[in-house]
Amino acid sequence: MKPFMDENFLLRTDIAQQLYHNHAAKMPIIDYHCHLDPAMIANDRKFDNLGQIWLEGDHYKWRAMRTNGIDERFCTGKDTTDWEKFEKWAETVPYTMRNPLYHWTHLELRRAFGVDKILNPATAAEIFAVCTEKLRTPEYSARGLMRKFNVVAVCTTDDPVDSLEHHRALQKEGFEIKVLPTWRPDRAIAVENPVVYKDYVDKLSEVSGIRISKYADLIEALQNRHDYFALAGCKLSDHGIEEFYAEDYTQAEIDTIFNKVYSGKEPTRAETVKFKSALMVEGAKMDHAKGWTQQFHYGAIRNNNTRLFKQLGADTGFDSIGDFTIAQNMSKFLNKLDTSNQLAKTIFYNLNPRDNDLVTTMIGNFQDGSVAGKMQFGSGWWFLDQKAGMEAQMNSLSVLGLLSRFVGMLTDSRSFLSYPRHEYFRRILCNLIGNDVENGELPASEMSFIGQLVEDVCYYNALNFFKF
């Protein structure tokens, strides 16, 4: 019986252990997609206690706690203390066995705080005290934690109307870790609610200095902000969409739809899809012109629980895997851009594991030799950000594409303690490759190249792909 989470955790063979310890473990971290608040980095936030840094905004944990019968006040409530919330989390942790939360929790305790005890109700007070004491030292501030995990670059997720003042302040200060914005224009295409959309367009008009009264003005304002993001070091866009939009449209139709929505009238489903299709194409062309990478996170059904959505808002743990037919529209969207030679480097993050092979074969259609791995199948995302999901994504990419050109892992997290997810991924990667060598499916004589392949997937591919 192996000890729990020892130095060879998840590494089943000698070769896997060599690959991890000699190659993967030493690589710096490029976290090219996350939801960290740049203000926390700029202000070098100090955390009061372990409950605060662990449970503030973490809908993964809230979801598990609710499933375990924990009252909502201990998840998102304002009338409970950080300790009370942490105590309920510690009560839940033993019940998360075989959920990735169990591994993440104990990896974070070990790597961040050097705590190797198992978290449960009996150890909760001691662990809370030890970790809280460390969090109150300078080494455990937001920046201190980033340094501790050897992070060299992070890309936050930012709306076109965001000021980017904190990114600029960090750059002016000369903070050694790159903190770059990512262009996330989801609200610019969300015409379903005309009242909300008009408020957003008016805000975009204000920050861009462009009076928006027609669709052409909207595009001009978005281009203005796109340029502003580029000046702040942005190199990626990101889109959170349910499905791909690739309807045919005329300019006259899009002009009419914009005028209709901006005047307060609700668009039809057909009009909504056409408008989204047009704006996605315009945004993709902007990305290509600047050499950015476009990312697409798609396939989630969000805010399923209407009652709790009204009570708590979005991103509180009530989203799930969706079931969309995507191949035809994905192909049509990519082909439209490729035909005019305006297809940017692209990463797809799929949420339905049913579609892994679909995505891998689709990106192969649009690899053009201009950039190694120009089209990427992103790492297991959200509900697939776990051992089986990562293995399935890498196996599909291996057999239908080139794992060796993969840009690797990201946290997709709001927490400064989530960096051990990179370690989790790296161990799984090394175990997959190590198994193949041990089984004679890859040549042991090529260990030098295989070691470099591991280092590339963990770090160098991302460094070269995004040109950080």
Image: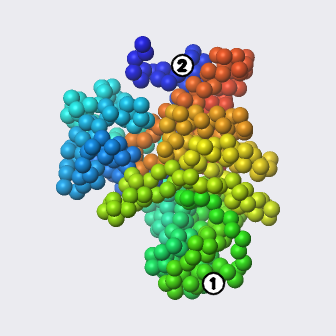
**Figure check: 322 above or below 398:** below
**Amino acid at circle 1:** Thr
Q: Residue at x 38, y 62 (%)?
A: 306
In-front residue for pair 248/139:
248
**Figure check: 122 above or below 414:** above
Q: What number is the disc on residue 256?
A: 1
Q: Nearer the viewer, mark 1 or mark 2?
A: 1
Residue placed under numbered mark 2 in the picture: 12
Residue 150: tell me if it is visible: no
Q: Residue at x 28, y 54 (%)?
A: 76
Q: Residue at x 58, y 85 (%)?
A: 259
In-front residue for pair 51/401:
401
**Figure check: 1 above or below 62:** above
Q: Residue at x 19, y 55 (%)?
A: 79
Residue 361 falls in image quadrant:
top right
First in residue order: circle 1 vs circle 2: 2
Where is residue 120? Give x, y as percent.
26, 31
Q: Please tell me whether mark 1 sits on a helix, a strand or a loop.
A: helix
Residue 378 falls in image quadrant:
top right
The answer to whether 26 appears left or right of 145 in the picture is: right
The answer to whether 331 appears left or right of 19 in the picture is: right
Q: In the picture, which quadrant includes the N terminus?
A: top left
- Near mark 2 (Cα within 10 A), the count class, few <14, some 14-19 or many ≥20, is some
Identify the residue at the far top of this view.
1
In-front residue for pair 454/381:
381
Where is residue 434? Give x, y as percent.
61, 22
**Amino acid at circle 2:** Arg
